[in-house]
Image: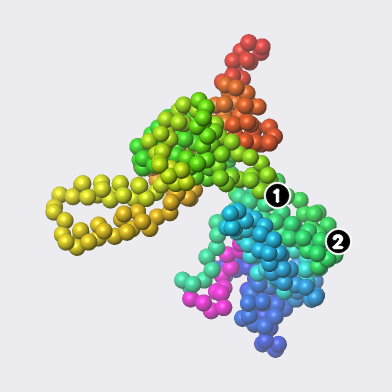
Amino acid sequence: MARPRAAFPAYCLHKGTGQAVVKIDGRDHYLGPHGSSESRAAYERLLLQWKTLGTTPKSGAPGGGALTVRAMFAAYWRHLEAQGLYEKNGQPTSERGCIAQAARPLVRLFGTKAAADFGPVDLQVVRAAIAKPLRLLEGDDGAPAKRRRTLPAVLARGTVNKHVHRIRRMFRWAVAQELVPAATWQALLAVSALRRGAKHVRETAPVRAVTWRDVEHVLPHLSPTLRAVVELMWHTGARPSEALQVRLADIDRTGPVWLFRPASHKTEHLGRERLIPLGPRAQAVLLPFLKADPQAFLFDPREDAKERSRRRHAKRKTPPWPSHMARRRDPALLGEGCNDHYRTDVLGKAVARACKLAKLETRWTPNQLRHSAATRIRREFGIEAASVILGHSNLQTTQIYAEADRLRAIEIAAVVG
């Protein structure tokens, strides 16, 4: 029986020089000192280029230069922190983490290469590493199996394209600071975005609107506070981050329709104002949660923590022991260790768990409630009204959220077609 061929060319030791070497297409590529992290990165970089593009560089050693890719990224990160970019209310936004995630394979594979020599082929190699990292057979510098690097799942095509754009944006900043020549960034623009049907990426289905029937089945499995948050999002089309930070101080109740201005919202860094009208149904949802303190958040997780503690105590069938009574005075059980308002990830996990308990065939997320509100408003009042309610500056963005009314199209086709 023939010996099975290895998935990748082996990472070997050249006894004469002590360097790591790999043979691809009959040619040896020297990677640096055997066992070093630099040689491991060069090995992965070489295999990614060979597997993805079918080519190999003329030399296995990275190019030299005054400013390396690693140093350029470090300077770019210091610039973000010094200028306070991608920060909101003193806290880094998720975009800061996305930049770090995009730069991680860039620095790992090309950290020692001169930033001026980073070209389109290198960018395609980084894109391949972002989309689907190679599952190499060798260990990571002799580390035990349980401590070896775990590989992430295959990313979506849109996420990969956004990460590549973040890398280009980093080089554009370096050009503006005269750290690299302009030709380097211009050459990276030649790498086009991945199109639908590309290999080694995951295609995601568009976010669809959810029906009230599916929402209604989930509500009994949510806490009273989160149930009110879901109902508020259904009636107003607010984002999860906006619905979770409602305060009495941010609501104008002078007219029959209340006006809610979130203290922080997604587009505030662009100088735009966010205004969410609260009609009778939304007002009915908020009334039981109104508080005397106008600065307090209406949807407080500490109230849910106290309610859970009371329900557990009411279900007891035996008298509590003295140790049980002492634990009941634990600040965590009284909700004193909780935040003053829910986070968006907590809401998402609670809805996912409620969908599982409700045994829904098609599970939904809180963001789909915004799509549902947009679709309903577009059906009854038009796309311009949906754009105003959602707070969009153009109708193209609203079309992403508001689905076309297929039933209306069928009625029109029955008359004119």
Mark 1 to mark 2 CA distance (whole Å): 23 Å
Please indicate, yes or no, whether residue 412 appears anywhere in the rendered image: yes
- SS for dot 2: helix
The quarter holding residue 224 reads: top left
Please indicate, yes or no, whether residue 400 appears anywhere in the rendered image: no
Q: Horizontally, is 313 left or right of 199 in the view?
A: left
The answer to whether residue 143 is magenta is yes
Residue 221's x, y, as percent?
35, 40
Q: Horizontally, is 23 left or right of 63 in the view?
A: left
Query: Which residues fall within the magenta stretch?
Result: 133-144
Q: Could you tell me which residue is drawn at 50 percent across and 28 percent down?
A: 279
- SS for dot 1: loop
* Colour theme: rainbow
Judge by depth and name the residue closer to the eye, 77 or 247.
247
Q: Could you tell me which residue is drawn at 64 percent across and 82 percent down?
A: 34
Amino acid type at image mark 1: Leu
Residue 52's x, y, as percent?
70, 59
Residue at mark 2: 183
Q: Could you tell me which residue is drawn at 55 percent across and 63 percent down?
A: 151
Say which of marks 1 and 2 sits in front. Answer: 2
The answer to whether residue 101 is magenta is no
Q: Earlier in the sequence, mark 1 or mark 2?
A: 2
Residue at mark 1: 194
The N terminus lies in which quarter of the figure? bottom right
Residue 8 shows which numbered tag? none
Q: Horizontally, is 379 left or right of 58 in the view?
A: left
Q: Count every numbered label the image shows and give the total.
A: 2
**Disc 2: CA contacts within 10 A as few (<14), some (14-19) or many (>=20):** few
| Dominant SS in magenta | loop
Q: Residue furthest left?
A: 319
Given contact means CB atoms under 8 Å apart, are the residues at marks 1 and 2 in contact?
Answer: no
